Amino acid sequence: MALLYETVPTFEDTWIECLGDLGRYRMAIEDDDLKDREVWCSVSRHWYSKASDKAPTAGRLYHHLAILARPNGLQQLFYYSKSLCVSVPFLSARESIMTLFDPHLNGSPTRLQEIDAAFVRAHGILFSGKDKDKNQLTKSVNEFVSNLDNYIARNTKSWLDSGYYIGIALGCAILEYGSESSSIMKAIKTGRVDDADVQMDDNETCAASQKQLDALEFAFRTHDVVFRRFGDPNVSPYVHVTLSFLRHLSHFPTAMGHIEEKVPWKLISRTLNSLMAKCLSVDKIESEEFPRQDKEIPRPLPEDFAQRGLLWVDKYYPNDWFTSAKLDDDEKYREVASMTQERRERCLWLGCRLASSGNWLTYDLATRKFGVPARFEIDIGEITLQQSEGGEDGDVIIPDAPAATATSS
């Protein structure tokens, strides 16, 4: 197979995926030697990642990567969810994903930390509808949300990748994991990008399902915790993913209509203003053009690779964004110091795009401050920013401010 890959380049994409398959099959039979199993897992992951670079909208490749991500349940959830929320979803993943969810739904012990287990369990209930005691979803969401702030504070930079895994999984949950019955999915498929006058007819417009309402509650309670961590660069990947999701939905009025009243716009505006205080290039974030760094070859952020291919990044990235830099698998998800400023500018640029209509956010060119329209002007409680000695790693002191009040309309 390796010889075919080298000598018959016409079918290179096929050979690459087949090499991934062979590595996965070899891994599956290595029951006795854990070291060999890990080696073949790494080999298979390399080829599948290479294949996904060439076909970023092919859901089956993310399904295969989800299998290889064991025992990292959070990463598995990310890959399984992504496999269903790309333009070519892998529908068989709807069965495979239950191998991740079933132990959590059945109360079997897992290797995950309690907070991550609560997050995966909540998704399992949302996905399957299996809520054995009728309030397990509420308990799981409460467990996750109530422990999240302290968990982020303890893990600091370790939460960078967890942040975008969680943000992407929540976006997929709002889309009901790509279900054709999802009212938001229908609105996106029916609408035309950048055409605010396009509306679905009465037969196509449908009320949100209970599953969608529960997913919205879960997502925006999580937002309410994360967006209160003003000055903490470790939550920026989560903020970036969330803003890119909201920007995409903003092009579809009917879709946005399902979520806009629950989005914590005031908190988002405050977060953006805290980022603006350290912005080095206002021209970049106010421009219509995607913000690039001064260097010639673009270096995508780790969450750029994680989001690539998802429905909500359609037309977000420039055509050459992923093709110019030749990066190894390990380098793609490696955080470097320069990314802090680049991510800050990206979030601010997305904020300006969301504010351009004035429907959800506002932006004053004179004062360079973000705000919200009157209908989203709510009391979000007192929030004090305490900068750590490190300068970049901030911590946030939050007085008693229940999550529900900030997200209520």
Image (cartoon, rainbow, N blue to C red):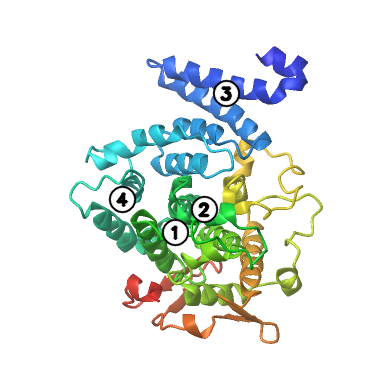
Image quadrant in which you'd find residue 60: top right
- The image shows residue 72 at horizontal and vertical percentages of 41, 39
Q: Which residue is mark 1?
A: 206
Give the labeled residue for mark 3: 20
Residue 378 left/right relative to 371:
left
Question: In the picture, which quadrant includes the N terminus?
Answer: top right
Spatial CA distance of label 3 from label 2 is 34 Å
Answer with left or right where residue 408 lies relative to residue 79.
Answer: left
Q: Does 75 appear above or below 188?
A: above
| Residue 310 placement, left or right of 399 | right
Furthest toward the left, the residue is 133
Under mark 3, the amino acid is: Gly
Under tag 4, what secondary structure?
Answer: helix
The CA distance from mark 2 to mark 1 is: 9 Å
Q: Is residue 366 above or below residue 178?
A: below
Residue annotated with mark 4: 118
Residue 369: give x, y in percent of width and height.
62, 82
Q: Which mark sits nearer the N-terminus, 2 or 4?
A: 4
User: Which mark sits nearer the N-terminus, 1 or 4?
Assistant: 4
Residue 214 picture location, percent across and down = 34, 58
- Which numbered disc, 3 or 1, marks the residue closer to the eye? 1
Instruction: Identify the residue position indicated by label 2 in the image.
Output: 186
Q: Residue at x 71, y 23 (%)?
A: 12
Q: Of marks 3 and 1, which one's residue comes earlier in the chain?
A: 3
Choose mark 1 or mark 4, whichever is in front: 1
